[in-house]
Image (cartoon, rainbow, N blue to C red):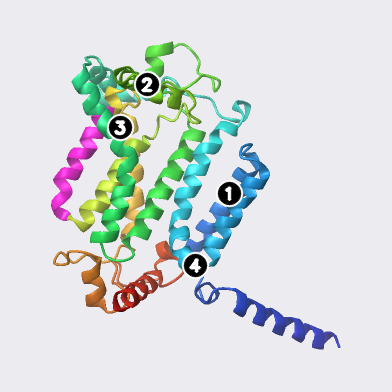
Amino acid sequence: MTIFFMELNKSFWLRFTKRYIPPDLYYHSWTIYDFQYVFLLILGIFLFNIIEFPVFFLKFLIVCIFAIGLYLPVPRKFFLPFLPIASWLVLFYSCRFIPGSNRPHIYVSVLPALENILYGDNLSAIIAKHTNVVKDVLAWLPYGVTHFTLPFLTSVGLWWYGPPGILAIFSRSFGYMNLVGVLTQLVFPCSPPWYEYTYGMNTPAEYTMPGNPGGLARIDELFGSNTYTNTFNGSPMVFGAFPSLHSGCAIIQALFISYIIPKSRLFCFAYVMWIWWACMYFTHHYMVDLVGGGIYAVVAFWFAWDYLPFVNEHYKNRWDYIKEKNGFLLPTNNYINNNLSFNSPKFDNNDELEIEIATAIS
């Protein structure tokens, strides 16, 4: 009788899982790379518990929306690559709810000391010494405008001009780079250059101190608003100078854009130099912060390299790839490893190609 019920239970469980678990997830070949979802799950549970606003009901509703999006096959193609970005944004927002008593000591003199050791002087102080309206506007454009709009433009460009699947890899790389960057800022909090000018090097930093717009205060004065002043005063991450995610975002976007459009490398390099100058001009970062953010971006791109689909310089947009490959999985830079962990579940690129072909035919 016991064996009968065990077999009945086993049969029921097999039918249940095969019916209600999506096929691509049911037949997915699990690898060590899938531990990324365990990490994100643990982080999500922690953040769910510490966030005080929104209230529990709204938090639960958001979680349910994400769960449904991850369960359904078509929305999963958006939600799964977006998961690292969502985790980064929620983590950044949640920093305000972590008590200062549970956070590490804030380092005030480490970055200026490294700046002088590595570069012989405080480059941020030199660049920010002479200011004028023209420089303010030139620095504001990359720091306050394109930094927030370029990720969306890059995503559209990668989707249109790049091979199918590259946008999902960019989303994961971009999200994980920023996520690790914020975690670094949490465990290694450092004061930015404006702190030195406002409080001096001998004043111990405290988590109760408000943020400061630095040179962006001049932009508020120029436009007659308090946009940047209010934004930085209420920032959840006041002492997050290292690494510079302005630098990291610019460089990882430049790497992906130059990957699909090699002729754009000079333009991408110029943009990175432009935003580096703006970060130091507005006294928000030291040079060592910018280099640190660049290292994070290069490492993220290096991890993604083996999973990047092959780029054909003769193809003008994604439709050329779809027509040529006729529904087959695009080759990656690593021809041996086609598990495509960056696009888990397995063969996600192939699914995308089939959907695009079906759409084109219909």
Q: Amino acid at mark 3?
A: Tyr
Pick the residue in front: 102 or 117.
102
Judge from the rendering whether residue 178 lies leftward or rightward of residue 87; answer left or right: left
Vertical position of residue 20 compared to residue 192: above or below? below
Give the alpha-carbon distance from disc 3 to disc 4, as whole Å.
39 Å
Specify the segment rendered in magenta.
262-278
Q: Earlier in the sequence, mark 1 or mark 3?
A: 1
Find the distance from the CA under tag 3 to the CA under tag 2: 17 Å
Which percent across, then down, holds residue 38?
A: 56, 57
Find residue 16 and report its horizontal and vertical position in percent: 66, 78
Residue 201 seen in this snapshot: no
Tell me if mark 1 has few (under 14), some (14-19) or many (20+) residues whose alpha carbon lies within 10 angstroms of its own.
Answer: some
Q: At x 48% / y 30%, what residue is drawn?
A: 237
Marks 3 and 2, the one that precedes in the sequence: 3
Checking the image for residue 143, the label placed there is 3
Residue 126 position, x and y percent, is 24, 18
Please tell me which of labels 1 and 2 falls first in the chain.
1
> Which residue corresponds to mark 1?
44
Assign the C terminus to one quadrant of the image.
Answer: bottom left
Q: CA distance from mark 1 to mark 3?
A: 30 Å
Q: To which residue does mark 2 refer?
A: 225
Q: Residue at horizontal 22%, vertical 56%?
A: 259
Asked if labels 1 and 4 touch by Cβ distance under 8 angstroms, the answer is no
Badge 4 density bin: few <14, some 14–19, many ≥20, Cα 10 Å: few
